[in-house]
């Protein structure tokens, strides 16, 4: 889909284009519809759109970081995987099994079926969880409560059916990729690895794997930013 819409090439090019278009698609209609309804800056509602720190952090900070992370993680993880072969940690007899494990991880990472499953989960379980967490006691830019319950505004419908699913999909996609990385490491651990007890890294020669935690730092930052925005919104 990225390639057909010219948002990416075969080597993950055009990251700035992806960040700009996806971010604006998730956030800009919320601003436009809130302005149209008079819910952007002031009025009879308690939380206008421009005062909703959580929404701005989610779509203007966390979402761009999740998109950018694809390039960062790829650049940092690929060399780590190659080092198993370059440093001859994987013995020659196990190279076919090692390559098969890597190929399996790449197939699952690029699996259309798996990503469609994530998308279906977002529009079923994800929306249900998000709606069940809404406890609107006061009128906001995305929902107005009355005696019959909370009713979404025009901006609220875009928020509910477009913006939130985009963010949830990106986050779930990274959760899936973390699982695939752990699965790959587990499969490699079952091979007959050539480890050296006296290696100067004090980890048998695989201390470089510790750097994988830094590779996934952008995902942790994005989640922390969303949590901080949520806390700030509740305090203010």
Image (cartoon, rainbow, N blue to C red):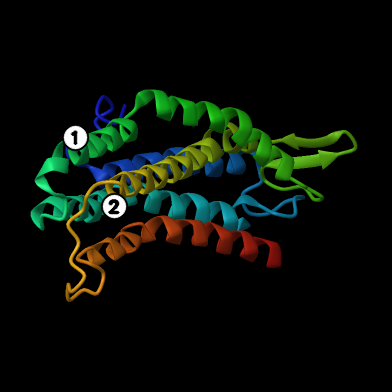
58 left or right of 202? Answer: right
Q: Is residue 154 visible?
A: no
Looking at the picture, how far across and down is residue 108, in whole percent? Answer: 33, 32
Q: Is residue 43 above or below residue 117?
A: below
Looking at the picture, how far across and down is residue 148, in whole percent? Answer: 88, 33
144 left or right of 228? Answer: right
- N-terminal-most mark, 1 or 2: 1
Residue on which disc 1 sits: 9
Q: Quadrant of residue 94?
A: top left
Among all residues in the image, which is located at the extreme right?
A: 147
Q: Secondary structure at mark 2?
A: helix
Towards the viewer: 12 or 14: 12
Towards the viewer: 150 or 30: 150
Looking at the picture, how far across and down is residue 164, in whole percent? Answer: 55, 40
Q: Is residue 58 visible?
A: yes
Residue at x-position 77% and y-position 47%: 135
Quadrant where the image shows the C terminus: bottom right
Quadrant where the image shows the N terminus: top left
Residue at x-position 57% and y-position 29%: 123
Looking at the picture, how far across and down is residue 125, in whole percent? Answer: 62, 32
Q: Of discs 1 and 2, which sits in the foreground?
A: 2
Residue at x-position 45% and y-position 54%: 62
Residue on which disc 2 sits: 73
Mark on residue 152?
A: none
The CA span between labels 1 and 2 is 17 Å
């Amino acid at each position: 889909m990225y390639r057909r819409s010219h948002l990416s090439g075969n080597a993950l090019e055009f990251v700035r284009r992806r960040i700009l278009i996806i971010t604006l698609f998730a956030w800009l209609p919320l601003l436009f519809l809130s302005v149209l309804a008079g819910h952007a800056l002031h009025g009879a509602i308690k939380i206008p759109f421009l005062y909703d720190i959580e929404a701005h952090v989610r779509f203007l900070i966390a979402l761009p970081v999740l998109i950018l992370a694809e390039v960062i993680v790829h650049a940092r993880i690929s060399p780590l995987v190659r080092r198993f072969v370059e440093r001859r940690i994987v013995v020659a007899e196990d190279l076919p099994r090692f390559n098969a494990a890597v190929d399996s991880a790449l197939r699952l990472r690029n699996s259309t079926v798996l990503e469609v499953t994530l998308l279906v989960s977002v529009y079923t379980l994800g929306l249900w969880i998000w709606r069940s967490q809404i406890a609107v006691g006061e009128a906001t830019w995305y929902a107005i409560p009355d005696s019959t319950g909370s009713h979404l505004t025009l901006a609220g419908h875009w928020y509910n059916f477009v913006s939130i699913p985009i963010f949830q999909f990106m986050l779930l996609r990274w959760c899936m990729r973390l699982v695939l990385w752990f699965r790959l490491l587990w499969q490699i651990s079952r091979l007959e690895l050539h480890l050296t007890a006296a290696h100067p890294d004090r980890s048998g020669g695989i201390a470089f794997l510790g750097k994988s935690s830094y590779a996934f730092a952008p995902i942790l930052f994005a989640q922390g930013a969303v949590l901080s925005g949520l806390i700030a919104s509740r305090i203010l």
